[in-house]
Amino acid sequence: MEKKEKKEKKSFKEFKAKAKDALTPKFIKKREEKFAEEVAAVDLSRLDAPYNDPKKTGNTKVRDFSPWERWKVFLVGFIAVVVFFFVWWLATYLNSELKSFLSNPVDIFNALIDFGFKPDREYILWTHIGYSLSRVLVGYAIALVTSIPIAFLMAWYKPFRAVLDPFIQFLRCIPPLAYVPIIVVALGTGESSKYFIIWLACFLTMTVTIYQGIRNVDMTLIKASYTFGARDKNLFIDVVVPSSFPFILTAMRLGVGVALTTLIAAELTGGRFGLGAFVNSMGNVTRFAEAFMGIIILGAIGIIFDKLLLLLERRLTRWK
Amino acid sequence: MENLENKKTIIKIDHVRKVYTPENRPEVVALKDVELEIKENEFICVVGPSGCGKTTLLNIIAGLEKPTSGKAYVKGREIQGPGPDRGVIFQQYALFPWLTVKKNILYGTKFLRHLEPVFKKNKETGEMEPVYETTTKVDENGKKVTEVVYETDKDGNKVPKQAYKLVKYSKAEREAITNKYMHMVRLDQFAHSYPKELSGGMKQRVAIARGYALNSDVLLLDEPFGALDAQTRSQLQEDLLKTWETEKKTCFFITHDVDEAVLLSTRVIIMSARPGVVKEIINIDLPFPRSQATKLDPKFIEYRNHIWEVVYKMYLDQGDH
């Protein structure tokens, strides 16, 4: 007990003496000198070392944010496709059970030669493609021509929008397959029912997209036009149409996809010809190589259309 | 200092009040009983904390917004809507992205009209003859009589009054106007570039050229240099000073930058927020031509410090920063 008290007293005395010293200029100077010595003693090069050594930090390369060249993108995509088909072929080659429903790239290629390039099959594949293309193009063209004015009317006139919007939003969520039977009853099994289904699906998607584009028109541009003395009718041609033009092109690209995906449903309304009908009938009799061939041709047509529209977009909206 | 009393009033704001009533929120008094007269060839700068209704005031003059009560006049006529007699330069440039620099300026002149004397071909002589203004009166017999209107010319003679009509500019005239102002903002080489290819300063120069191409007496600028870097801004300030001195227009310039306000203007209007009222109007009595060197003038510093004090005090009082 006593020892501890003594110790405390002693430390307090020392502390008091130190505190007294702490305020003297001499002590401050001494402390600063000591600090300067300490600073001088630090080897700053050692601090830098790990950051300068690429082996330690792993920063062996300058990060390259430059975009890939176009041909590189194409090449990588092409290799991926080749690898995919090879794996497909290998899997079905090793496992015959898989082959029964996955078919085989070689068989699919043979089917293509068979249906497309041999006289004994009357080159029937091209007839199918012709029928399908005409249906897609007619339905799509009518959809394009109708959706643009409807979208503009919806964006411009509130009552029009109030009436149409619930119908469009409702119908947009229903797969076209659902109303195939009704359309068959209403329009028969001829071409018109196919046109109608493709038109409806494209029209809904395209109207919504174009409408959104028109609604997004920059208000400052409209204000600026007004200050130049423009009237409402000028605004439409000079501001609204050009600024929603990129959205019309986007809608056109979306529309092509929708038209092709609805084709199978559209061709369920009957008829012998058409890629959709071909895929359906071949699938029904478990000739999967032929069915796959039809599917691949559908996809290829989709890619070709998309690329063409992309080219058009690049040409027409260089200002974007 | 020129005497403002003798100058023509261009813009008159008469007890203008603007109240916004957003849904589910209390109403905001953007402008409370603002009164203001802007004379010919004045350069007015408006400063004030955000929310003081500067932009609302500009929009009312531009005709893009209607005052809740009170009236605004341009050259004695009540403002009914936007028009080419008041050019507006927006902070966001408002360039049409699908038009090139030249076409942007050209588009600005598309709806311009000007008065042209009316001439008619005389069928007998085959010569062009001036058409005179006429009035239709009903005489004692109830018949309609058309009479030529006479006016007195500068020599005191009674002469028939020439009839005028509003005509659009021809394509060639519009091209000429466009080229002139494109040259003024030094963008001739970029005539065929799209706005996306230009820097912010260049974009704003296009907008300024377009504003000038309207050839209006009034130019309204809504923080035009707000989004630019300091160097570009000082360059454009000098450009604007130069063009204002050569083509005198009545400018109404909104800014946050007190230095900019003192440098450019002949009068600075300080507005306070909530409700927006004109707090103080200061005549800037600095000689023209001005440049960035004017900022070293002790008078400039005095003005600047004074305005800063007023604005900063308001900023502190507002308490919601």
Image (tube, coloured by chain):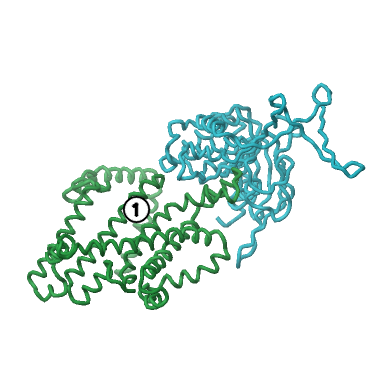
Give the chain letter for green: A
In the rendered view, does A148 fall on the left or right side of B131? Answer: left
- Residue B314 lies, in percent from the top left, at 62, 50
Question: Looking at the image, which is closer to me, A169 or B172?
Answer: B172
Q: Nearer the viewer, residue A142 or A250?
A: A142
Q: Disc 1 on helix, strand or loop?
A: helix
Question: Which x, y percent locates residue B305?
Answer: 60, 39
Q: Residues within 10 Å of mark 1 (few under 14, many from 20)?
A: some
Find residue B315 and report its horizontal and vertical position in percent: 59, 51
Give the vertical position of B313 relative to B202 (above or below): below
> In the figure, is residue A130 to the left or right of A98?
right
Give the residue drawn at x 46%, y 57%: A213
Chain B is which colour?
cyan
- The residue positioned farthest toward the top in the image shown: B155
Above or below residue A168? Residue B20 is above
> Is A277 positioned to the left or the right of B151 in the image?
left
| Corner quadrant of residue B130 | top right
Quadrant into which the N terminus of chain A falls: bottom left
Q: Is residue B229 visible?
A: no
Q: Residue furthest right?
A: B140
Chain assignment, label 1: A
Q: Which residue is mark 1?
A: A309
Residue drawn 38% across and 63% down?
A139
Tell me where residue B275 appears, x and y as whole percent: 66, 55
